[in-house]
Image (cartoon, rainbow, N blue to C red):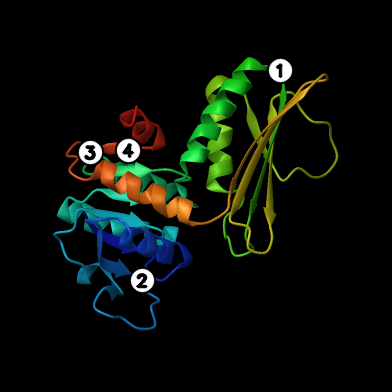
Amino acid sequence: MRIILCGYTGHMGREVRECAARVPGCEIVAGVDPMAETTDGVCVRSFAECPADADVIIDFSHHSMTGDLLDFAEKHRLPVVLATTGQTEDEKARIRLAAEKVPVFLAANYSLGIAALTDLVKRAAALYPDGEIEIVEQHHDRKLDAPSGTALALFRAVQEVRPQATANCGRSGQGKRTADEVGIHAVRMGNIVGVHEVMIGTQNERITLKHEAFSRGVFAEGSLKAAAFLKGKSQPGIYDMKDLLKEGE
């Protein structure tokens, strides 16, 4: 599997490179990083320098690169694994447009454990229709977007069974908690890889569902699984972790 890796020199880029080196038949044929201090034949500064005969693009860069990345993917009919969060509404619209032409794998989190957590949260929210729900996410102090894309994905899972639910990000000020609100809280500290905790409580009991990532390698592994899932797929569209898990059943 020939991969173009966007965000080649970043923290996650390094994790993907190390993980790919352990997978037989997996090769990073180009790494895109406009801010790279040096290039080495694999690391390049623009998509114009990338080979067109890759099998898939994996993106762990910054959402501002979405347009250039998708332009290249459409031009060469390459599937894309988007593992970057924080896209603007215009960038999200661009992703939907690209998915009409090429396969796009889009997930807020590439951990299989988070996929399981999301399913459990949806079930528990349905089981306790009147339960109060709070989501707390923790990440390292370098993370730019808050709340995390994963926290928002967990909220959307709640909305699937509670369409009236509203998000209250970073609750503050005066006023009682409303019946339909879901509190979402972000912690930024040190070198926390990623912790997501969902609490569902009534007057008599509370359920706490929690996932903690100990290494960024879990996200690299998931992105490579997603890339292998997309390789050779000719049907355009947006795919996610549910599709990946379903294929493994």
Q: Answer whether labels 4 and 3 touch (C-beta < 8 Å).
A: no
Instruction: Give whichever of 154, 91 is nearer the camera.
Output: 154
Type of the residue with mark 2? Asp
In the picture, measured across the screen, residue 100 lies left or right of residue 170, that is left
| Quarter of the figure that contains the C terminus | top left
Name the disc covering residue 33, or none.
2
The earlier-in-sequence mark between 3 and 2 is 2
| Res 140 → quadrant | bottom right
Which residue does the image show at 41% across and 54% down from the upper left? Answer: 220
- Judged from the image, the secondary structure of the residue bearing numbered disc 4 is strand
- Residue 146 appears at what percent x and percent y? 61, 52
Residue 72 is at least partly visible in this image: yes
Q: Answer whether labels 4 and 2 touch (C-beta < 8 Å).
A: no
Label 4 Cα crowd, 10 Å radius (few <14 / some 14-19 / many 20+): some
Residue 103 is at least partly visible in this image: no
Residue tagged 3: 236
Label 1 Cα crowd, 10 Å radius (few <14 / some 14-19 / many 20+): some
Distance between the Cα atoms at labels 4 and 3? 7 Å
- Residue 120 appears at what percent x and percent y? 56, 27
Name the disc covering residue 238, or none.
4
Which residue does the image show at 58% across and 60% down from the upper left? Answer: 143
Which residue in the rendered view is the most extreme toward the bottom? 38
Which residue does the image show at 36% across and 64% down from the upper left? Answer: 17
| Res 208 → quadrant | top right
Name the disc covering residue 229, or none.
none
The earlier-in-sequence mark between 1 and 4 is 1
Name the disc covering residue 130, or none.
1
The earlier-in-sequence mark between 4 and 2 is 2
